Amino acid sequence: QVRLVESGGGLVQPGGSLRLSCATSGINFKIYTMGWYRQAPESQRELVAKIDSSHNRNYTDSVKGRFTISRDNVWNRVYLQMNNLKPEDTAVYYCSTNHRGRDFWGRGTPVTVSS
């Protein structure tokens, strides 16, 4: 059974940092591309960052230079280090992967950037 569990969200002031973590189980983690997505209120879910099995990374333009995605193939976790946070980064952040043609999602972790 595939399971993704996010943690690390919270309230932070503009310019602050958070590190999100996604614990996975039920997949051969090291061969999977992992993604972080976010959904702001009244907005569609969008891709934030992806990392593949070779540690190649892609980011949406709005987070380049501020966010870093990484993975730990020993602990089967994927991380999102978020620096210089802005109010527009406020959203629920989700971890996702595709397993046998089906997308799997965690329940998300909320991030609020506000003074």
Image (cartoon, rainbow, N blue to C red):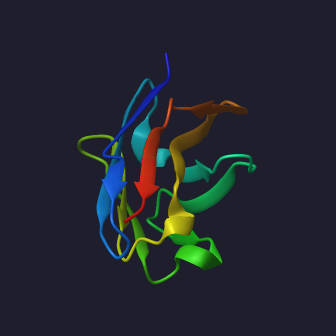
Residue 98 location (% of width, % of height): 63, 38
Whether residue 49 is situated above or below residue 107 in the rendered picture? below
Q: What's the residue at 43%, 51% (across, down)?
A: 111
Q: Quick check: can you spot residue 51? A: no
Q: Horizontally, is 84 left or right of 98 in the view?
A: left
Quarter of image, res 48:
bottom right
For the view shown, which residue lies furthest in the top direction?
A: 1
For the view shown, which residue lies furthest in the bottom direction?
A: 65
Q: Nearer the viewer, residue 47 or 51?
A: 47
Q: What's the residue at 36%, 47% (across, down)?
A: 9
For the view shown, which residue lies furthest in the left direction?
A: 74
Whether residue 42 is situated above or below residue 6 in the rendered picture? below
Whether residue 52 is situated above or below residue 60 in the rendered picture? above
Q: Horizontally, is 94 left or right of 22 in the view?
A: right
Residue 69 location (% of width, % of height): 42, 64
Q: Nearer the viewer, residue 27 or 46?
A: 46
Residue 39 location (% of width, % of height): 63, 48
Whether residue 50 is situated above or below residue 58 in the rendered picture? above
Quarter of image, res 113:
bottom left
Residue 2 location (% of width, % of height): 50, 23
- In the rendered view of the protein, which quadrant contains the C terminus? bottom left
Q: What's the residue at 41%, 71% (across, down)?
A: 85
Q: What's the residue at 52%, 80% (across, down)?
A: 64
Q: Nearer the viewer, residue 44 or 49?
A: 44
Q: Quick check: can you spot residue 111? A: yes
What is the total number of numbered labels drawn onto the structure image? 0
Q: Nearer the viewer, residue 17 or 35?
A: 17
